[in-house]
Image (cartoon, rainbow, N blue to C red):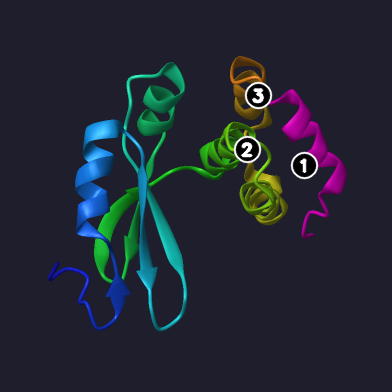
Amino acid sequence: MTVFPEDRFYIDEEAIKEVMKHEGMFNLIDTLSGDKVDFWILTGTPFDLSRFSRRIQVSVLGMSMYISTPEDTILMKLNWSKLSGGSRKQSDDALRVYELQFRVLNMEYINYWVIKLDLKRPWEDLLSNAEPLI
């Protein structure tokens, strides 16, 4: 992929093709910094449709792209943790986003989807472990 030169970025084109068929997720990894970007494929679920409608446009490496809001990132990470049987990585990621963004989070939106996605327990765990940055 010319947008992401192979000497700097790792992206598995076969994984992308597979994800497009099965509505999953793939990663882009910056091999110099170790930073990772998750790309989620849109599904027809009510949460995905909501998440997509709330996306925000940002500039990354001089390119314009859309990303999920902090609220939707938290909810996705908690849901992935639940679906994977309790992935600590996903719940820790959700916790860190919450701690960094807590002042601007739409808590009404999060609480609505916590109930709809059956995330009450992971959400309560996150809140009990959170140490928001002031």
> Are the two marked residues, 1 and 3, in contact with CB atoms closer than 8 angstroms?
no
- Specify the quadrant of the image occupied by residue 128: top right
> Are the two marked residues, 1 and 2, in contact with CB atoms closer than 8 angstroms?
yes
Q: Residues within 10 Å of mark 3 (few under 14, many from 20)?
A: some
Q: Is residue 64 magenta?
A: no
Q: Which mark is residue 87?
A: none
Residue bounds of the magenta highlight: 119-134
Tell me which label, 2 or 3, sits earlier in the chain: 2
- The alpha-carbon separation of the residues under discs 1 and 2 comes to 9 Å
Residue at 68% x, 40% y: name it. Answer: 86
Q: Position of residue 66 (x, y in %)?
A: 33, 48
Q: Position of residue 33 (x, y in %)?
A: 45, 80
Q: Secondary structure at mark 2?
A: helix
> Are the two marked residues, 2 and 3, in contact with CB atoms closer than 8 angstroms?
yes
User: What amino acid type should be assigned to the residue bearing mark 3?
Assistant: Val
Q: Residues within 10 Å of mark 1 (few under 14, many from 20)?
A: many
- Specify the quadrant of the image occupied by residue 3: bottom left
User: What amino acid type should be assigned to the residue bearing mark 1?
Assistant: Leu
User: What amino acid type should be assigned to the residue bearing mark 2?
Assistant: Leu
Q: Is residue 83 left or right of residue 53?
A: right
- The residue that disc 1 covers is 126
Q: Quadrant of the N terminus?
A: bottom left
Residue at 27% x, 51% y: name it. Answer: 15
Tell me which label, 1 or 3, sits earlier in the chain: 3
Position of residue 87 relative to residue 9, above or below, is above
Q: Which mark is residue 114?
A: 3
- The residue that disc 2 covers is 78
Q: Nearer the viewer, residue 107 or 96?
A: 96
